[in-house]
Image (tube, helix red, strand yellow):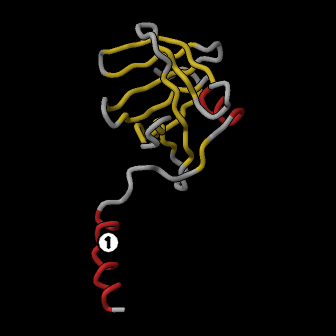
Amino acid sequence: MNRWILILVPVLVLILMFPATAVSGERLTGEELKAFYTDKTMVWTHFRTGPARHYYGPDGTVTMKRDDEERTGRWWIHRNGTMRCVRWDNRRDDRCHYTQRNADGTHTLVHSRRGDSIAEIHEALPGNQL
């Protein structure tokens, strides 16, 4: 019994010190994704590139503004209905990510392959507020 305690206590300490980077919450799907993004300006902080605003037009266009940078492209809901996708005009690849509703009412963008959070969505503002 004492041996198990000596093994479990350090393991539990490590788990508490280094929580998993994967996020937990409820992923939006299909119609929820459409309603969340369509004709909305997302105010978010990408964990690698910093704060930005993205406007998702009802016609499938997307515009991003960050500091002095602006990008345009197309957006859609992935055919499996679980991800929001973007293809920027200057890129050849599609960027598809999950959108997760967190318990505190915020939303997180989640990497489709790694499962880690890549951006915190602070606000979903109505219309184009770039």
Dividing the image into 4 quarters, which one contains the N terminus?
bottom left
**Measured along the vertical axis of the image, is residue 80 above or below residue 117?**
above
Up the image or down, 40 lies above or below 118; here it is above
Q: Nearer the viewer, residue 127 or 28?
A: 28
Say if 54 sits above or below 120 in the image.
Answer: above
Residue pictured at 52% horizontal, 16% vertical: 62
Q: Name the spot of residue 10 as percent of width and height, x first.
A: 27, 75
Locate residue 78 relative to residue 45 in the image: left or right.
right
Task: Determine the image quadrant of residue 61.
Answer: top right
- Name the outermost residue toward the right: 31
The residue under the point 49% across, 37% down is 123
* Residue 69 position in % (x across, y down): 33, 15
Looking at the image, the residue that sits furthest to the top is 90
Residue 80 in percent (x, y) is at 67, 30
Q: Quadrant of residue 117?
A: top left
Label 1, secondary structure: give it.
helix
Q: How many marks?
A: 1
- Tell me if mark 1 has few (under 14), some (14-19) or many (20+) residues whose alpha carbon lies within 10 angstroms of its own: few
Q: Is residue 12 left or right of residue 114?
A: left
| Along the line of sight, the residue nearer the viewer: 20 or 70 | 20
Nearest the viewer among 5 and 22 is: 5
Residue at which label 1 appears: 11
Residue at 57% across / 28% down in the picture? 84
Work out which residue is located at the far bottom of the displayed protein and give it: 1
Looking at numbered disc 1 in the image, what kind of residue is underneath it? Val
Where residue 59 sits: x, y (%)? 64, 12
The quadrant of the rendering that contains the C terminus is top left
In-front residue for pair 129/98: 98
